[in-house]
Image: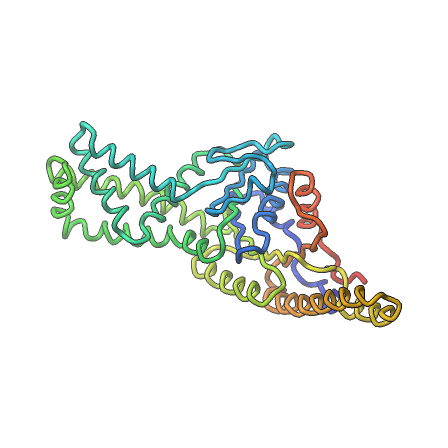
């Protein structure tokens, strides 16, 4: 795009992520339908060239990794065909929560009276406090992922609102558990008695066990929170398309990530018509050749030009907003679907080899 002087801008590619060997968590997110899954798969493929073991995890309830890689992917890490160091898994947080609650209920009916009292109370809490189910399932997800031996984990996230809620859970849980710990001395007896009512034994022992369980959860949450807010370990890649609603949503996402203290300095703009061309150049060509084109071709070219002009406007806004601080990567609109390992490999090169915005 000839209007942009990119000589002093951050490199328009995701090569900075590949080069940052300390990264352990890479989140890919944005509005629904902008190409998050394709971007996360392509990024994971590029990372697999330089890292020993890479995992891509889908946290979107409507999983698409199986469709993208054209192979069955389940709840456990599944090796991707054609790679010896890339795996994928699709996690259903709601299903995880139901299993966790079921385990609590089974434990509550077990022979150990003290443990059963704690489990019954925890099961009651997770089913009655709004939002706690998602937060608890998130902590279970992080425990599960942390126990796996991978150099870097790429998260293919759900649309923006769900993702922001997911990323806020560590902070929310940390604050909530901190408050519980503060109230322990004032209302500790009540907690122990409440646990005892659910089938436990001595209230004093119940209180200690309850606080031990909460402290254990808090330790995991603190660890996750520290990792999320460390730019050496975690970064978030925002994905959008050159349209008003998507750019607007990206701005909201960047601001929210900043509030949570999560690093974000990469934006991928998908579905770009002729990224290396400028609408003015194409318009000049169309004006010079329009008369020689059939009527149908003239209509098709006119609609394409209208779309190109609109995209250029929003890409310009994107560079105005983020160009000085963000690596803004333009990904071309193709005339075929990017599905299967070979097409993903080919398309992933566009993330690393920057498009020359000054090309004519």
Q: Is residue 16 left or right of residue 356?
A: left
Q: Residue at x 49, y 35 (%)?
A: 74
Q: Quadrant of residue 21?
A: top right
Which residue is at 21% across, 34% downward? 108
Q: Give x and y (percent) for residue 85.
A: 59, 32
Foreground residue among 328 and 285: 285
Q: Which quadrant holds residue 198? A: top left
Up-down: is 122 above or below 285?
above
Tag count in the figure? 0
State the colouring used for the structure image: rainbow
Q: Nearer the viewer, residue 81 or 208?
A: 81
Quarter holding the N terminus is bottom right
Location of the C terminus by quadrant is bottom right
Q: Nearer the viewer, residue 141 or 299?
A: 299
Residue 311 in the image: above or below residue 177: below
Instruction: Give the residue at x 71% y 63%.
Output: 6
Q: Tell whether 37 sits left or right of 258.
A: right
* Outermost residue toward the right in this view: 292
Q: Position of residue 115 (x, y in %)?
A: 20, 33
Report x, y in % for residue 338: 66, 46
* Residue at 45%, 41% in the rendered image: 91
In the rendered image of this protein, does residue 152 appear above or below residue 234?
Answer: above
Side of 166 relative to 215 (left or right): right
Where residue 294 sits in the image (x, y, percent)?
A: 84, 65
> Which residue ends up furthest to the top in the rendered image?
111
Q: Is residue 300 left or right of residue 238?
A: right
């Amino acid at each position: 795009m000839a209007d942009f002087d990119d000589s002093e801008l951050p490199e328009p590619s995701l090569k900075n992520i590949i080069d940052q060997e300390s990264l352990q968590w890479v989140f890919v997110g944005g509005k629904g339908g902008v190409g998050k899954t394709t971007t996360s798969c392509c990024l994971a493929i590029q990372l697999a060239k330089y890292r020993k073991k890479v995992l891509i995890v889908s946290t979107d309830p409507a999983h698409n990794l199986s469709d993208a890689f054209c192979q069955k992917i389940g709840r456990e890490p599944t090796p991707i065909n054609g790679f010896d160091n890339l795996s994928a898994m699709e996690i259903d947080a709601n299903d995880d929560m139901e299993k966790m609650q079921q385990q609590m209920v089974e434990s509550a009916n077990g022979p150990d009276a003290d443990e059963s009292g704690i489990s019954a109370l925890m099961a009651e809490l997770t089913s009655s406090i709004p939002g706690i189910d998602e937060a608890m399932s998130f902590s279970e997800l992080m425990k599960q992922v942390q126990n796996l031996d991978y150099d870097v984990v790429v998260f293919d996230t759900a649309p923006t609102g769900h993702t922001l809620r997911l990323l806020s859970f560590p902070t929310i849980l940390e604050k909530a558990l901190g408050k519980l710990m503060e109230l322990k001395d004032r209302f500790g007896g009540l907690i122990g008695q409440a646990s005892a009512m659910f089938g436990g034994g001595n209230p004093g022992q119940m209180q200690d066990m309850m606080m031990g369980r909460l402290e254990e959860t808090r330790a995991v949450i603190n660890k996750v929170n520290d990792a999320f807010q460390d730019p050496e370990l975690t970064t978030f890649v925002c994905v959008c398309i050159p349209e008003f609603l998507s750019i607007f949503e990206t701005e909201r996402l960047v601001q929210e990530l900043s509030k949570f203290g999560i690093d974000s300095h990469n934006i991928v703009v998908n579905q770009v018509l002729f990224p290396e061309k400028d609408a003015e150049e194409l318009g000049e060509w169309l004006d010079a050749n329009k008369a020689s084109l059939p009527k149908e071709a003239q209509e098709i070219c006119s609609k394409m030009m209208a779309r190109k002009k609109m995209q250029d406007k929003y890409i310009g806004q994107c560079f105005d907003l983020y160009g000085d601080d963000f690596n803004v990567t333009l990904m071309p609109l193709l005339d075929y679907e990017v599905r299967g390992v070979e097409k993903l490999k080919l398309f992933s090169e566009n993330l690393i080899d920057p498009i020359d915005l000054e090309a004519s």
